[in-house]
């Protein structure tokens, strides 16, 4: 396998992962602002749609002539830049993927700049991102190993090789894609029902959420120590997590130590001939929880 094909595979993998994290994105989530005064994509009074932006203070080295030599665009802990929402971040990632600089730097060809239109609908934003990625991919796919080993000419990356530029770009795609995933997780958890609001509280749902610090008094009040959530019981999850105190309390409340639940559901899988269903003891053993396994063995003798 050539260096070029390895880089292309890596780039594809990063984008495929990012694309999967955007499946099901809604317009409401796209424009959601998780912090006060976020930068977003907004419609102005004249009907145009623009991204929020303004200069902000960050670390920089300024030359005698007034030009910035180097800059850290992340600001600092005391003066961070405004928080950016999903709409803003998808727009930025689209711009990074599709900008003409990529082709100019790697191939030396002057091409027309791709105009990245800020979007306020999820379908349009995701479609634009895909188009921009296709443009980047076509450039990368055209590069031979010989050309990737060439040095860059001019600009702040002068002297670096083109393979270094590609790796910097893939790093850019990776960390921005990860940010999108984190924001989607944050939205999902900020808008999910609180398991403590259920009546009665489902102990297995609390266990899936890892809310062990809240479970002890609830176990005493719960009517069903064997309630299931997503096909799994609280005893199995507590055993896997090594929560010995919770396991002991559930057993005292009559939780069935012989009940079976398939281990693969932890990773989104389903029962199979190999993993048809395992007891809490097997879950504890699988995750290396020796003290919990010892407790369960003593209980089932």
Image (cartoon, helix red, strand yellow):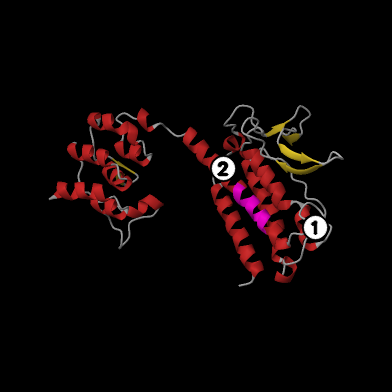
Which residue is located at x 39 percent, y 54 percent?
Answer: 269
Q: Which residues are magenta?
A: 167-175
Q: CA distance from mark 1 to mark 2?
A: 33 Å
Crowding near pointer 1: few (<14 within 10 Å), some, many (20+)?
some
- Towards the viewer: 293 or 46: 293
- Towards the viewer: 201 or 106: 106
Point out residue 181 in the picture as x, y percentages from the top left corner. 55, 45
Point out residue 258 in the picture as x, y percentages from the top left corner. 19, 49
Q: Quadrant of residue 138?
A: bottom right
Q: Earlier in the sequence, mark 1 or mark 2?
A: 2
Crowding near pointer 2: few (<14 within 10 Å), some, many (20+)?
some
Quadrant of the snapshot with the N terminus: bottom right
Which residue is located at x 30 percent, y 59 percent?
Answer: 275
Total label count? 2
* Secondary structure type for disc 2: loop
The answer to whether residue 258 is seen in the rendering is: no
Q: Would you say the magenta stretch is mainly helix, strand or loop?
A: helix
The disc placed on residue 25 is 2
Tell me if 93 is positioned left or right of 270 in this view: right
The verdict on residue 194 being magenta is no
Reading the image, the residue beneath label 1 is 104
Point out residue 36 in the picture as x, y percentages from the top left corner. 61, 27
């Amino acid at each position: 396998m050539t260096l070029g094909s390895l880089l292309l595979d890596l780039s594809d993998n990063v984008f495929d992962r990012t694309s999967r994290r955007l499946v099901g994105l809604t317009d409401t989530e796209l424009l959601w602002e998780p912090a006060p005064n976020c930068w977003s994509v907004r419609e102005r009074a004249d009907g145009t749609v623009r991204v929020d932006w303004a200069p902000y203070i960050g670390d920089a080295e300024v030359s005698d002539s007034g030009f910035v030599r180097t800059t850290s665009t992340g600001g600092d802990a005391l003066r961070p830049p405004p928080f950016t929402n999903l709409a803003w971040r998808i727009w930025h990632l689209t711009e990074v993927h599709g900008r003409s600089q990529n082709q100019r730097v790697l191939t030396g060809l002057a091409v027309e700049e791709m105009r990245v239109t800020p979007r306020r609908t999820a379908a349009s934003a995701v479609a634009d991102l895909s188009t921009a990625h296709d443009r980047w991919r076509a450039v990368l796919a055209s590069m031979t190993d010989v050309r990737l080993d060439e040095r860059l000419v001019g600009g702040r990356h002068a002297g670096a090789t083109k393979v270094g530029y590609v790796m910097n770009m893939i790093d850019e795609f990776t960390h921005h894609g990860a940010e999108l995933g984190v924001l989607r997780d944050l939205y999902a958890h900020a808008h999910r029902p609180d398991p403590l609001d259920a009546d009665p509280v489902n102990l297995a749902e609390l266990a899936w959420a890892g809310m062990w610090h809240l479970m002890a008094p609830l176990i005493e009040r719960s009517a069903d120590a064997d309630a299931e959530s997503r096909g799994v019981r609280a005893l199995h999850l507590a055993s896997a997590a090594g929560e010995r105190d919770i396991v002991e309390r559930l057993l005292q409340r009559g939780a069935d130590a012989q009940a079976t639940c398939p281990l693969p559901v932890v990773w989104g899988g389903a029962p199979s001939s190999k993993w048809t269903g395992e007891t809490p003891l097997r879950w504890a053993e699988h995750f290396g929880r020796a003290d919990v396994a010892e407790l369960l063995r003593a209980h089932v003798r």
